Structure formats: C-alpha cells, structure tokens
Amino acid sequence: MSITVAEPQVVVDLIDSSQAPLLARPYYQGSDPGPIVAALAHVPEVLEVAMPFISALYGPSALPVRLKEIVVVRTSAHLECRYCIESHSVVALDAGFSCSEILGLRDLDDTVRERWSSDEAGEPALMEWIDAVAGATGSVSKDSAGRMREYFSDAEIVELTLLIGATMMLNRFCTALGLPSSNGTLERLRAEDLL
Amino acid sequence: MTQVAEAIASGALPGRLWMYSNYHCNLACSYCLTESAPKVAKRELPAELLLSLAREAKELGFTSVGITGGEPFLLPHLPDTIERLAEILPVIVLTNGTLFTKERLQRVQRFAGKPVALQISLDSPDAVVNDTMRGPHNFRKVIEAIPALVERGVQVRIATTMEEMDESDMVRLCALHRELGVPDEDHIVRPIVRRGRAVDSAMGVEAQAADLPPELTISADGAFWSPFGPTVHSGALDTDLLVSRTTSPLQRPAGILLRLVQGRPPGEDSKLGIK
Ligand code: SF4
C-alpha cells in the first residue's frame, strides 16, 4: 500500500543549528536533530521536557522494539500521519520487519489481523488494541482489553497504551505542522518500494 | 534567600533584569541590533507588565532593572512608568536622546534625585561621523539634550558604540562629554556587536553566549541570555540566545538561566535515529 496522505507543507520555520536556543543546543550536537526537535526548539523549555518523555517512550525500554514499532506504524496509519509513517517504516525496517509486515501494519482492513503471521501470539491482540484506541473515539472495547490481558502484563499494557496516545499526539503535531521526511528516509523507502 | 539571589550575591549572575519595552524607533542606525525603525512592529511590553516583572525581579533578588528597545521614549507612558519602576528597583533607560522636547524634559525632570539613569548614545565627537551611523541631526539633538537633562538633575550616562576610534578622537569625545556635564565614570565605550543590521554591513564583533554576561532579558518574544539576545535580522527574531518563551513567573526563566550558567547535562536523549 502506498502512502496516500497529502504532501506536507511546512507551517513553521524549522530552527537550524545557528539559531538553536541555548536549551536546545545539546540536541543539535553532531547531527541534524530532525524536524520534531527543530520545531519544538521554538519553545525550548517545552523541548527540554518533551524530549526526555519522547525518548523514554520511543527509546529502549522493557518493551521489545518490535511491539513499539507495531504501535507507532499502525497508530500513524490510523491518523494518516505521513511523516510518522515514513520515518517509522524505516525504523521498522531497521528493527527487522519485512516489507510485507510494514505494509500490513499500514493496512487498516480488519482482516489484516487475522492474516497476521508471527511467532508472537500477542501481536494480533495488540493490533486490535491499537485499532480500538487510535481508530475510534469513545470507550474502548472490553473484549479488546480482555485479549490484551491474555498476552500482556499491566505494566506492558500501560506502556503500550501510553505509546499509542503519545504517537497520536505526535501524529497530529507532525501533520499539522507539515514536518518533512528527510531525503535519506525517502530514498530508503523508495528503494524498498514502501513509498 | 532564593537561589537566584544567592547567585547574584556571589556574582554568578548579574543583578540587572533587562526589559525590551518596545522595538520601534524614530531612528534606523546602521548597526542597530534590532533592525529598529519607525515602521517596524512595536512588540511592546505593556507598562503593567514592566512593573510586575520588576516586582518579581526584586523578590527574586535582582538589584536593578534596565529598559531598552527600540526607543523607549516613543511610549507615551514611559516617564510615569520609569518613576514607578524606580520605586521598586534602580532603573537605567537606554535612549537615543533625540526625543527630549521641552515637554518631555519637563516630564523627566522628576527623575532628579531618584535612582534613575538615562544612558544616551553618542558615537563620535564629529557630527558627520556620528550622524552617518545614527541619522541626520542626531549629534545636534543629543548634545542639546544631555546638558538640558543634567541641568535638571537627571543622571545621564553616555554610551559610545564603535568599531574603532583613534586616540585623538577619543580624547575629543571625552572632552565633549565632560563639557556636556557627564563625568568619566558615566561614559561607557563598547564595541558594535555583529547582530541585526551590523551583520549586513559586516560591522563589529561576533558574540556568543560565552562572550556575554548572562543578564536576564525579557522581550515580547520571551526571555534571553543577554540584552544582545532578542536581536532581529532580515525581519526575523534571533533565537540563538533564547532562554525560554515563558517570562512569567519570572522565576521560570531566571531558574533556567541559572541552570544554563551552572551547566546542564547533554541531550543524549535525542539520539533516536529519526530524521
Ligand atoms: S540603535 Fe538604538 S537608536 Fe539606533 S535604531 Fe536601533 S534602537 Fe534606535
């Protein structure tokens, strides 16, 4: 499945290293910090608390990276966030997902979960949970919650659910501000036929 | 004693809080840090905000406030506001000194004997040289205003901003400021800093945070490391010396500035590999 959401139009100036505010400078050291940091740098006191939060959720933690990328790619597909789908498709490739798995995560058809083949029995339950949390509003199905509890501990459910919520927040942030994917990301996706 | 007060008492933080009252100016000097001119956006800090920031500054342990711009005296409320600020903390106001009409002189006369100093720019003992940088008739207006203020008992400091000046010119300039009634200790000479319009003409010296004292500075755009922070180039605010967008409570930017002065942990948490 190709990404069909609109081309981004960047809404705010992305702050480059020469204009990086004092609190933001550590994030610019050595490399391009990416557009989320470059946008958040406009409000450095928010950046300095947002980045550790983002890092705690998206960086290494007790959860396997595979579960995290299932959450991020599928949630981003629900919210049609081009930037997050593109950037996390690359992260997912690096984490060992196959192209067909990535395309499956982006495909919101219910039958994808039934066709999902993985050694990890909890993954379809997680996908169902993501679909219930990110793909709908209002209360979340007790059946989906029950299936999550079959496979995941309370701590894992909390972290996975917060990750869905944080991804939804970032999806809307990135989409509203039209944050652009890097050329490197686009080239990689083109090479893998994932654009 | 607050941590900020301790830092000020120990000399780790300068004791003056700077506030950009506005960005517009009746002049458009060639080296202006803020690209000020008559028609730029005013970006004022309202009088009540100036006063409440000064009150917060006093509570935190700051020992004086500075008002700069733009040209602060373009704001009609300024003389009253300065008088009220001086009841809170000693005040220094940076002004180009060209707006001291008879009526305004009367309004500022009440600063006499109060902890208020007006710092007026005068860049050369030669009218032509001075006016080349600062605009027509600037020299005449300033050398008329200074003695008029001094006669009324208002404390005046003279600030000379320059790239280079030969010794004989400096001797003449010092003779001039003494003649105008301003003693040597109230004459400040400082380099042009290469920000704002000075970038376009490649004037002055480059200055990074490490080159500038950490003087907390509030403008309509946020809190900055120094009064050389909230500068404008090509119409865009410089953010490299931005401390925070939050300015109130003042404790927030003051605390961040103190943390920056004392060093902070590196942003290792940014290495997520996402571009
Ligand atoms: S340097 Fe001062 S007097 Fe000159 S334009 Fe800028 S604000 Fe106005």
Image (cartoon, coloured by chain):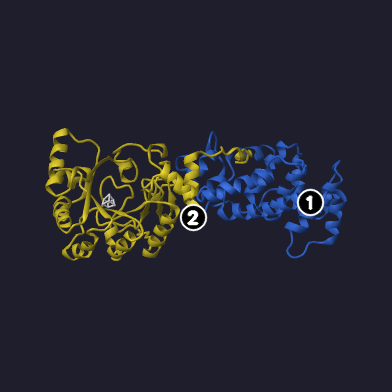
Chain colours: A blue, B yellow
Residue linked to disc 2: B246
Question: Disc 1 or disc 2, which is closer to the eye?
Answer: 2
On the image, the x and y values in percent for residue B113 come to 23, 58
Give the crowd class for mark 2: few <14, some 14-19, many >=20 residues within 10 Å: some
Residue linked to disc 1: A157
Give the crowd class for mark 1: few <14, some 14-19, many >=20 residues within 10 Å: some
Q: Is residue A94 above or below residue B105?
A: above
Task: Give the residue at x 69% y 46%.
Answer: A57
- Label 1 sits on what residue type? Ile
Task: Give the residue at x 41% y 59%.
Answer: B55
Chain at numbered mark 2? B
Q: A47 or B251: nearer the eye?
A: B251
Q: Which picture quadrant has residue A93?
A: top right
- Label 2 sits on what residue type? Thr
Query: Is any part of residue B78 visible from this angle?
Result: yes
**Quarter of the image with the C terminus of chain A in it:** top right
Secondary structure beneath dot 1 equals: helix
**Cα distance in 3D space between marks 1 and 2:** 35 Å
Task: Give the residue at x 48% y 45%.
Answer: B258
Same chain for marks 1 and 2?
no
On the image, the x and y values in percent for residue A133 come to 75, 58
Q: Give the left or right position of residue A51, taking residue A113 as reference.
A: left
Task: Give the residue at x 41% y 49%.
Answer: B216
Q: B261 or A130: nearer the eye?
A: B261
Secondary structure beneath dot 2 equals: loop
